[in-house]
Image (cartoon, grey):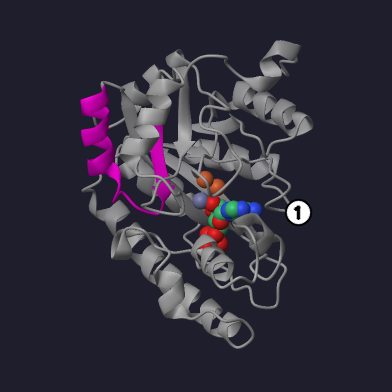
Amino acid sequence: MIRHMPHEDHGPAHGWDLHCHTVYSDGTKTPAEMIASAVASGLHGLAITDHDTTAGWADAAAAARRAGLPILRGTEITAADGDISVHMLAYQYDPDNTAITELFRATRAARLERAKRMVARLSEDFPIDWHSVLRQAKQGEKTTVGRPHMADALVEAGVYATRSEAFAGVISGASKYYIPTPSPSTDEVVRTVREAGGVSVIAHPGDRGRNTTLLGDGRIRALAGEGLGGLEVWHRGNADDQRRRLLGLADELGLLVTGGSDWHGAGKPNRLGENLTGDATVREIVARGAIEVVG
Ligand code: AMP
Ligand code: ZN
Ligand code: FE
Ligand code: FE
């Protein structure tokens, strides 16, 4: 059954922003700055979801307690489904679970190798090097290094004016300098998050800007059978036709429907709280998860 009430096309007007990045990956703000902004804009709560890490959780929890703003703790996990690059949000899992700790360790090691190789290629033609890229990682070794840090180094060197321009240029997935990130499969991520007691959600599944080929209905049905928890429908990358498709799948498969801004501070135009998840859905995620809400 496809829901098509027009007011549902943009998700809830009040609630939680369940997709936010900080300096622990490629966002430009600290968890404390993020939480202060969320309080100022009246969000009910948010989730910290840095790429492939839990490194920001302790900072975020401390800031949430100080501010009295409830937060979920999560991660945006880089995965692959055949040739398709898929981002998966994972919430409220046990961060000490061995399987998930090992998954992050392997991904982060692979990411570091990939980043070094890509920077070596770029440095042949542009005035950047590994040192100037690492300088962009605001939390040193704790930061998950990726293309945004290469973009920032190119901006610092005067090659581009903004991060977005670098992404449209030599950092793009179509560039001859590009190297993909070796990633765990979507099946492995769903299984591991489930084992760690968390809830997995496919991030921006209808974003044609990221993938010319999107994850198909058949694969989403299969992942739902393996324990996938939800779909991030309310995200600026999902066009209206995709939102309708994803709502239909969520209804059919009993998946949660979430929303998030994909805020990166000054690193992207996305505004904190521009897409939200309803309170009832957040309560369900918390009920299924292995850890407490903090704040
Ligand atoms: P990587 O995982 O290292 O390939 O880098 C991809 C990350 O870069 C994504 O997860 C986004 O957070 C970020 N990103 C992608 N496109 C842009 C853009 N146009 N401007 C800023 N950040 C971007
Ligand atoms: Zn990011
Ligand atoms: Fe993403
Ligand atoms: Fe993201």
Q: Is mark 1 within 8 Å of ligand 1?
A: no
Instruction: Say whether residue 220 is magenta.
Output: no
Residue 121 % position (x, y): 58, 84
Residue 295 visible: no
Counting from the top left corner in percent of width and height, residue 42 is at 44, 17
Q: Answer whether residue 58 is magenta in the image.
A: yes
The residue that appears at 70% across and 53% down in the rendered structure is 211
Local secondary structure at mark 1: loop
Q: Quadrant of residue 295?
A: top left
In the picture of the structure, the residue carrying the numbered disc 1 is 212
Please tell me whether residue 23 is drawn above or below residue 223 in the rendered image: below
At x 70% / y 48%, what residue is drawn? 214
Could you say where residue 43 lies in the image, as x and y percent from the top left? 44, 20
Image quadrant in which you'd find residue 46? top left
Number of numbered discs on residues: 1
| Residue type for callout 1 | Thr
* Residue extending farthest bottom: 124
Residue 180: x and y, percent? 58, 69
Is residue 212 toward the left or the right of residue 282 in the image? right
Report whether residue 144 is seen.
Answer: yes
Left or right of 194 in this view: 270: right
Q: Is residue 221 above or below residue 139?
A: above
Q: Residue at x 31, y 64 (%)?
A: 140
What residue span does the magenta drawing correspond to? 47-67
Q: Is residue 105 left or right of residue 46?
A: left
